[in-house]
Image: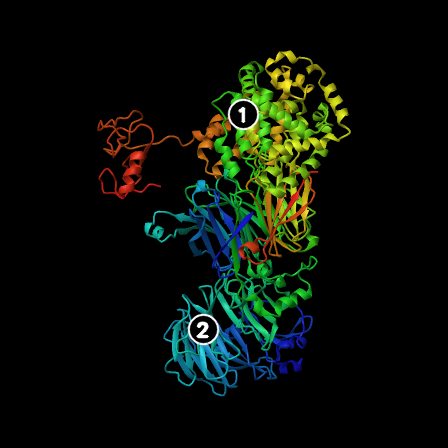
Amino acid sequence: MEKMSRVTTALSSNTISGKTMFCHLDAPANAISVCRDASQVVVAGRNIFKIYTIEEEQFVEKLNLRVGRKPSLNFSCADVMWHQMEENLLATAATNGAVVTWNLGKPSRNKQDQLFTEHKRTVNKVCFHPTEVYMLLSGSQDGLMKCFDLRKKESVSTFSGQSESVRDVQFSMKDFTFAASFENGNVQLWDIRRPDRYERMFTAHTGPVFCCDWHPDDRGWLATGGRDKMVKVWDMTTNRAKEIYCVQTIASVARVKWRPEKRFHLATCSMMVDHNIYVWDIRRPFIPFATFEEHKDVTTGIVWRHQHDPYFLLSGSKDSTLYQHMFKDATRPVDKANPEGLCFGLMGDLAFAAKESLINSDTNRKPYPGGDRRNPLFFFKKTDPTEQFAHVSSALTIYQTGLDSNNMDWFVSTAQRYLLTGKPFAELCDHNAKVARELKRPQVSTTWTMLRIMFSDPANLPAAGLNHSLSKLGSLPLMNSFSLKEMGSGLASESRLERGKGDSRQDNIHLETGNSHISNNNEENEETEGSDGPAECMFGDAELDDDDLYSMDHENQAEEQEYTLPQEGFQLRHEIVDNPSAPEHFQQDKADSPHVSGNEAEVPCLTPIESFSLISISQPLFTHHLPASFFCPIVREMLSYYAEQGDVQMAVSVLIVLGEKIRREIDDLTQEHWYMSYIDMLQRFELWNVSNEVIKLSTCSAITCLNQTSTTLHINCSNCKRPMSSKGWMCDRCHQCASICAVCHHVVKGLFVWCQGCSHGGHLEHIMNWLKSSAHCPAGCGHMCEYT
Amino acid sequence: MFVARSIAADHKDLIHDVSYDFHGRRMATCSSDQSVKVWDKSESGEWLCTASWKTHSGSVWRVTWAHPEFGQVLASCSFDRTAAVWEEIVGESNDKQRGLSHWIKRTTLVDSRTSVTDVKFAPKHMGLMLTTCSADGVVRIYEAPDVMNLSQWSLQHEISCKLSCSCISWNPSSSRAHPSMFAVGSDDSNIASGGKVQIYEYNENTRKYGKVETLMTVTDAVHDIAFAPNLGRSFHVLAIATKDVRIFKLAPMRKESSSTGPSKFEVQIVAQFDNHNSQVWRVSWNITSTLLASSGDDGCVRLWKGKKLVHLQQEHRRLPSVGNRLQCSDRFLIFLRWVHD
């Protein structure tokens, strides 16, 4: 291993070899140090003082320096340093205040060389001068630093920092200055030849500065670490120490060591809580470049194995282990760190944040390496250009949906415009169908229309239906000619009925093509496209009403002409014409419902329509006085379908409009679930009034109680400030009316708005008007009223 | 279709998460620069940064909003092994004039011994509850017994998932038929360690969360996971960001009301898209759960459209790059649809 000491390039990993390995120590380590040729390491602690040789596969204990039956306190080390020029020379800082040097060349078992007992308290740090062989520096808890000449029995000079305890002393690389860090947050710079006064002092941290380290390339950079969890890098070449980098770690910093051959890298370990060793790129101070996570307890000593090799790190820990870490085995937090953020907003807008390099250039796109992100290739790509690690930022973009698609406006409009109560059932359905149609949701519209047909009491129909039909007579021929033209000559009337269950599959395909037609010329609303499916199912399930549906549509024929989507419906019909299986289904349908045929006369209102309509076969199906319950299973299925599709709005609206007609068909839990989901949606869109209406109209006890909580308001009389009695307008005590408008001085009945600061208020309108002209309370109390 | 609006976020390092609030009017971003920023949408649709503050002493992985019923509350989690709860303070009128709001830390949750990788509030109907998951595989569920006091959180459950956790998602269903349930994803990249998505459900009898399902087919590292908004469905839909985008359907099997064992699910993979051709980092559902957005290492956002949440059939439709229109480089959106056959 001797040849290693000559290696001076970053590529020395070729010569120093090894692997991540560890050995158990007998006791917790306090500090470690390597000899110059990186072949041996000394581990020192309160109860341990040993030298290990670092071999290819393992650590081998070479020497136990802790000898004697009852070792003295001089063996209990707070710090240790191996001389970088004299390979037999070690120095330790003892917890009893002694500074001890050890000569490994001694023949006796006890290698202790010299003993300096000048410090009064624990010595925290010892440091050999890098070039002056006999110069040793110590820093102690007693606030003093001493310089020893190893040829003499006593210290040659004492430096008094006039600060608190010294935590670290470090010789600068080339000259005779050294840095000392103190528990009060100061760092001092001394010239070894001038013990009377420090050359410079500055406050580096809030709280103790536990460690400092000079940059090995002699740039005058000093890294310091403190209890404030920060690592700071100072430029000492200028007149005043200038903080040039600052790294925030997650725990107090116990040790800091610059990484050899890597200008911007340093390693840190923590004094408590955190057991990991971090290697930081100081240019990217927020996320560690690499992490070693092997230790189970606090890491107390870290040292790069060789002063020119950046790939091997040795560490000792309170968990009584000594580790050699290979850089390539380090975890890279940044690899796991998510480079992107993505979130859908309420209105369908999309917020997207991504690493700029990901979205700006194709060159940086790395193909996904077959599932294994840790292959060697990947590793080298990552480590070599260290520049890649620095200066990373993200771009934040909001993708807003245009007015047409994906937008949630349809939901809001629908919620606001639907009528759920207050009118006869048929009108509600018609109204809602109209709303849906205007919002370009033909399927939903169709559903409403069908519901109306299914559940309208036939007894009512003559009144409503006949009128409609008659009044719209003018438009009916139009419908017919339109249909005829569209249908072509070959279309038999039964082809309408074949849109039965068996063909729903086929239908979908047609639907798809129909859709793509549409979406080519107008920017198709994604939402309506999505709900094409439901309509198809509806037709399939409710084939009985198919034709009636169209006859009812006549009413709105004129309006429909403006829209493209209803035409789509007609187009579809053609394509189905060719379906050879149609007659069979027709037969089946007839067979399924023989009992409903032959009652034409029962509903006279429809005869006018029939006379215009091409369809005669379906007529009996409609005209028959079917009980509403007949449709319930279908409607139940339909509601479930809408709910499963995510259109809970439709499910709840229908549920409310149909009321008792369907309620018993659906179990309470499901109903409650739908209501809850819909109310939650409404509240997201801040449609409080609609939400409250839905709550009011629901029949689930769990829902109706939602707006019954927190409805009691305890008020004080605005005059005498005492609590109002339980009822009435008058205050019991001062016999004045409590709620008087501060503007018009009349009693407020209805909306009373008041300032929570001064409790004055009045009619909403009055107060609003007042606040337009003045910010002060209209009651004249001088309060600057705030209304939110 | 989409209009892109670039925002100068001015974070000093990577942004790891963006999150809209309940009403979609506010947005929070968090970054490795240890800060969280809150953005408010102005009347004109501009996003303005109204608060920016240092939240942690490490990378902030996630930020999430509480239901507004509990106030303007944010939770963040970080590499520094903590999660924190923040509340906006209103009333400082001079702050308001400058267009800034003030957020104060209500609590720090320090139970984790490793990086806290995700934080999520539980659905509102469960009360004010917060869930964290950490890199050492522990899911912690905290509850604020008094919703008015955001500084008191008690650790209710501690669930060990055995695998390093990267993301968590609550099932948003408020139905009483669905016991509260969450899914955890792991970024453990070792295929041999099995399924990377676990699903836990609350058991009324033991009063504990128990594992009810592991998606064994997901063996690669999972980066994000999202339950679709439930909206009255009887089943649950779960989107997973791993080396591709996957969508699972979890249909609870009917069980007798008397039986109290853990629910059984019929798990079905509905869709699997590898169009990103790289790691997928994020998935997000729109409010009606008709659209799923995903983003991956390819720098693209892709939208996936659900037709019927049962079967799938892919159909590509590539839209012109929005970048052309907006000088936003080569970002583009692809619409894909999974179609019911």
Q: Residues within 10 Å of mark 2 (few under 14, many from 20)?
A: many
Instruction: Give the number of the disc on residue A720.
Output: none
| Residue at point 56%, 66% (across, down) | A389
Q: Quadrant of the C terminus of chain B?
A: top right
Subunit of label 2: A
Instruction: Give the number of the disc on residue A234.
Output: 2
Q: In the rendered view, how is the structure colored?
A: rainbow
Amino acid tagged 2: Trp
Does residue B285 show up?
yes
Cα–Cα span, label 1 and label 2: 77 Å
Examine the image and state in which quarter residue A688 appears.
top left
| Residue at point 55%, 22% (across, down) | A472
| Disc with the residue nearer the chain's start (1 vs 2) | 2
Q: Is residue A41 above or below residue B134?
A: below
On the image, numbered disc 1 is attached to which residue?
Answer: A430
The x, y position of residue A707, in whole percent, is 44, 30
Helix or strand or loop: what does disc 1 sit on? helix
